[in-house]
Amino acid sequence: MGRMARDEHDREDLLREATALIERAELALPGEAEHLVAGFRRDGGLSLFFGPDPVYQFNAARHLRRAFVAGTMFKAERGRLVALHRHRETDRVLLLRRELNDQETAAFLAAMAKRLERLRDALDVARYSVVGQVPADADVPGRIVAWLKQLAAPPAIADRL
């Protein structure tokens, strides 16, 4: 679920088919070109899809476990962020791994925290509209804002995915 479809039909499919997210919603937010699809896994972890990019996924302890930002996949390893880049060769595709240094990690977390703070503030004052939600009677936006209010600043990085 790393890429989100751009047309309306495919977005509806994403909301319907994101079954790993047992409670999920698609929200239109002011100032955002793409809708946010956000939801909770069975274990309480939160996934946030700001269109196809960025994407942030957290575990139940509110630690960042995976992200997709500016076309790059990031994953948590032993409390550090690792960037994964696809490199195409004639006969194969390699996945190149590079651990972010402390400065890169701090910049990544600061940019993510700023984005999530804007989201939390918009949800907190009900500056959004619900495009779709599963289950229909859940308060997914309320659950998201409560979850984000408990997120550390900057968020911690998980020990592993």
Image (cartoon, grey):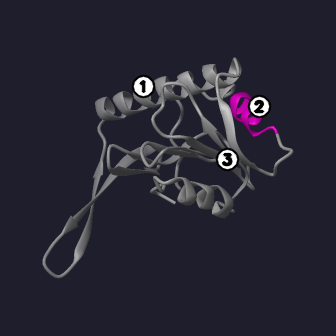
As drawn, the residue found furthest toward the bottom would be 91
Q: Please name which of the two marks, 1 or 3, marks the residue nearer to the observer.
A: 3
Q: Residues within 10 Å of mark 3 (few under 14, many from 20)?
A: many
Q: Say if 4 sits above or below 70 in the image.
A: below
Q: CA distance from mark 2 to mark 3?
A: 11 Å
Q: Which residue is mark 2?
A: 142
Which is nearer the eye, 130 or 144? 130
Query: Which mark is drawn over residue 131?
Result: none
Rendered location of residue 13, percent (x, y): 61, 61
**Magenta stretch bounds:** 139-147
Q: Which residue is mark 1?
A: 110
Residue 24 visible: yes
Q: CA distance from mark 1 to mark 2?
A: 24 Å
Q: Are marks 1 and 2 in contact (CB under 8 Å)?
A: no
Query: Which mark is drawn over residue 39?
Result: 3
Q: CA distance from mark 1 to mark 3?
A: 22 Å
Q: Amino acid at mark 3?
A: Gly
Q: Are marks 2 and 3 in contact (CB under 8 Å)?
A: no
